[in-house]
Image (cartoon, helix red, strand yellow):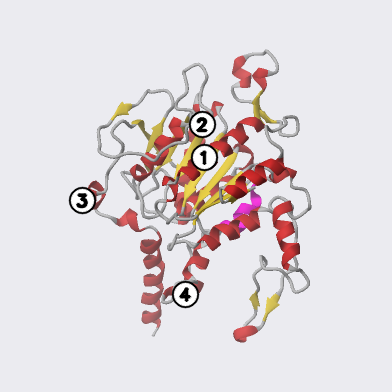
């Protein structure tokens, strides 16, 4: 009997690694068969070394062409005409995006969407996790968090990339990686974009008929619902969901959105318990109490829990009606919304060198948020009206 339990424990422990990080276990032939990047993609291959010595082979796409050209077949989604098609060497990039891909993808799968960020005037680092792409190592939650930290430290150490506001972008599992990174480095990130991501791995498994009984044994939890509360209220969050996503239902994105509205408030909510099913269980804190009406709950979500929406005025939630787990990013509405989100970050971050003439070496590393000093181009009410027409909200 002890031997059987030990075997079961190993099966569950190692089996979930395979299920959560499937593409990391593809053989070389499978990876080559799925390799595809745009014909005109200009990129640099950069090698990052993590704190535990793992080498990551990542792609860096810059607005200024310094990269090698690799000819491969493919195309890209249309970028809104109102966005920048490129940035000159003198003006500099609008932002530096650090992008984290999903669990069933490799770094090159996000080259197409990455190219769209470049067309908008952003530099973008496409991170390849350990075990994925051509990176070394074996994936795990702890390992991927180290990978993300290495990517951020690379950007901060680069004299060019570090000049621009840093925005994190994560798709599916990549969203959980991005949330974990900003939770650990809240003051270093200017914005967060999450696409078709989840509240936590156990809550995803809980909805699967066969695997739901294994939920208590999951150790790769990726608890984004808890970590997102550590994001500063003044750091804008954009959450994008595909209404037809069958892998991670839109309810997960909506749940993260609701939780994010009360981030940074340090509110200690009393824990409510239930003795149903013969055991003591904590109830879902995100559901209203019996004395809290649905109208009151919606008001808290829209106003940011404390009744003051100003801190959260640049947050955005976008639901793509026909979006699935893999193709939400191909919608034109996606890029229109991303363009607006990046523009809002540009308005809120001002380089002090524009205000005072001093040594450029100092202002290359110092930036300040002056959101209270700058009036946005539209009122918050006008923005909300515009968003409602495009199936997204602020």
Identify the residue position indicated by label 2 in the image.
82
Residue occupying the point 70% across, 18% down: 355
Is there CB contact under 8 Å for labels 2 and 1? yes
Select label 2 or label 3 by which is in front: 2
Give the secondary structure at mark 4.
Answer: helix
Q: Position of residue 283 (x, y in %)?
A: 65, 73
Residues packed near mark 1 inside 10 Å, few (<14), some (14 to 19) or many (20 plus): some
Counting residues from the N terminus, which is met first, the one under dot 4 or under dot 1?
A: 4
Q: In the drawing, does residue 200 fall left or right of residue 349?
A: left
Counting residues from the N terminus, which is met first, the one under dot 2 or under dot 1?
A: 2
Q: CA distance from mark 2 to mark 1?
A: 8 Å
Give the secondary structure at mark 3.
Answer: helix
Select label 3 or label 1 by which is in front: 1
| Overall secondary structure of the magenta section | helix
Is there CB contact under 8 Å for labels 3 and 1? no
- Please check the rendered image and state whether residue 227 is part of the magenta-colored stretch, yes or no: yes
Q: Position of residue 113 (x, y in %)?
A: 41, 41
Q: Position of residue 61 (x, y in %)?
A: 40, 32
Highlighted range, magenta: 224-231
Residue 293 sits in quarter:
bottom right
Counting residues from the N terminus, which is met first, the one under dot 3 or under dot 1?
A: 3
Any part of residue 51 in sight = no
Q: Is residue 181 above or below residue 199?
A: above
Identify the residue position indicated by label 3 in the image.
29
Counting residues from the N terminus, which is met first, the one under dot 2 or under dot 3?
A: 3
The image shows a total of numbered marks equal to 4
Identify the residue position indicated by label 1 in the image.
336
360 or 47: nearer the viewer:
360
Select label 4 or label 1 by which is in front: 1
């Amino acid at each position: 009997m002890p031997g059987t339990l030990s075997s079961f424990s190993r099966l569950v422990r190692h089996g979930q690694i395979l299920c959560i990080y499937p593409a990391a276990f593809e053989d070389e032939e499978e990876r080559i068969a799925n390799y595809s990047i745009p014909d005109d993609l200009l990129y640099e291959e950069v090698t990052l070394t993590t704190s535990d010595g793992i080498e990551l082979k990542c792609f860096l796409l810059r607005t200024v062409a310094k990269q090698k050209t690799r000819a491969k077949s493919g195309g890209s989604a249309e970028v809104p005409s109102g966005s920048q098609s490129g940035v000159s060497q003198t003006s500099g990039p609008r932002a530096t995006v650090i992008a984290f891909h999903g669990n069933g993808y490799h770094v090159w799968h996000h080259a197409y969407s990455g190219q769209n960020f470049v067309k908008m005037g952003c530099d973008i680092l496409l991170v390849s996790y350990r075990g994925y792409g051509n990176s070394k190592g074996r994936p795990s939650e702890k390992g991927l968090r180290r990978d993300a930290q290495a990517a951020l430290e690379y950007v901060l150490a680069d004299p060019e990339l570090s000049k621009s506001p840093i925005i994190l972008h994560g798709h599916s599992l990549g969203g959980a990686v991005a949330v974990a990174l900003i939770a650990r480095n809240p003051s270093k990130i200017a914005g967060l974009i999450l696409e078709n991501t989840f509240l936590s791995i156990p809550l995803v498994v809980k909805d699967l008929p066969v695997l739901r009984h294994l939920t208590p044994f999951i150790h790769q939890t990726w608890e984004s619902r808890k970590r997102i509360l550590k994001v500063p209220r003044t750091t804008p969050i954009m959450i994008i969901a595909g209404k037809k996503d069958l892998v991670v239902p839109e309810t997960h994105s909506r749940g993260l959105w609701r939780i994010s509205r009360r981030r940074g408030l340090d509110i200690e909510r009393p824990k409510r318990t239930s003795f149903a099913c013969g055991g003591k269980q904590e109830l879902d804190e995100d559901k209203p109490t019996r004395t809290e009406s649905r109208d009151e709950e919606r008001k808290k979500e829209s106003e940011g829990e404390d009744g003051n929406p100003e801190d959260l005025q640049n947050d955005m939630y976008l639901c793509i009606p026909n979006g699935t787990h893999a193709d939400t990013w191909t919608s034109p509405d996606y890029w229109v919304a991303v363009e607006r989100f990046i523009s809002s970050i540009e308005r809120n971050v001002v380089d002090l060198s524009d205000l005072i003439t001093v040594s450029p070496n100092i202002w290359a590393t110092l930036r300040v948020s002056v959101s209270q000093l700058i009036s946005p181009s539209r009122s918050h009410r006008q923005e909300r009206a515009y968003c409602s027409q495009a199936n997204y909200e602020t």
